[in-house]
Amino acid sequence: MLKTGTNIKKIRTAKNLSQQAFADLFELTRGNISSYEENRAEPKLETAIKIANYFCIPLSKFVQEVLSVNEILQYNGDKLLEDEGRIINLQMRDVPFISDTVYMRGVRNELAFDSAAEFPKLVLPETSNNKLVAVSFNSNIAHHQALPDYRMNDVLVFEELTRENVHLCDGKTGLYVAGSEIMIGQFHLSGTTIDLVLNNFKKHRFDFAKPGHFWKLFAVYAHEKG
């Protein structure tokens, strides 16, 4: 579970800011801040980046660790960086991003869904040694009916399925990309066989000889409610 809501409340309290004053810094509403602090919603990725940048807190610490008041006060914050796209964190990486635009281009056969080098990039914390790919969820992507109730534009981050993590995938959400096909299903293990299942009629069998096609859900950045 992400720690953004807890940390927003701690930062706000340490800086003696009301929910409204904090919201005004980032063009949000007081209701947004309340929902974050009560863990009823998560800020979207770009909002989390803006908050972390504003207070000069490494993004990975902001979203993954509960910060102490002393840590918050030690950061040299209280100024918005001129370049909001710059992330103050040495442990970051560029992650290929299947945005809505990329999805539509793939559907039109203008690019292949397994051609990650052509995708735009998201800058995300370096929290996995495996390759990552991010997907902007939309209901047009073929997906298993038992998936959690993801909302439009939730960002799902997947890590490549490897010999080191394949034993962890049974029953987990997975991504398959190949050519013009993309689907989000559930992994089913039976003996030495691993299938990514979409429904009773469609599935793909995992093969170590075909790297870059199968991915396991690693993290979710929930799109904030309006």
Image (cartoon, rainbow, N blue to C red):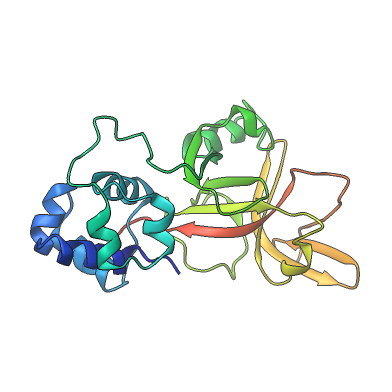
Which residue: 34% across, 45% down?
46
x and y percent of residue 17 in the render?
A: 10, 61
Viewer-proximal residue, 12 or 47? 12
x and y percent of residue 207 in the render?
A: 86, 52
Which residue: 44% across, 62% down?
64
- Is residue 52 shown above or below 19? above
Which quarter of the figure is the N terminus placed in? bottom left
Viewer-proximal residue, 137 or 208? 208
Viewer-proximal residue, 140 or 226? 226
Which quarter of the figure is the C terminus placed in? bottom left
Viewer-proximal residue, 69 or 182? 69
Which residue: 88% across, 45% down?
209
Would residue 36 appear left or right of 107 to someone viewing this image?
Answer: left
Would residue 1 appear left or right of 147 to someone viewing this image?
Answer: left
Which residue: 54% across, 47% down?
135
x and y percent of residue 5 in the render?
A: 30, 66
- Is residue 124 shown above or below 20? above
Dividing the picture into quarters, in which one does residue 31 lie? Answer: bottom left
Would residue 81 appear left or right of 104 to someone viewing this image?
Answer: left
Give the mark count: 0
x and y percent of residue 148 in the render?
A: 52, 69
- Is residue 15 shown above or below 209? below
Would residue 210 appear left or right of 186 to someone viewing this image?
Answer: right
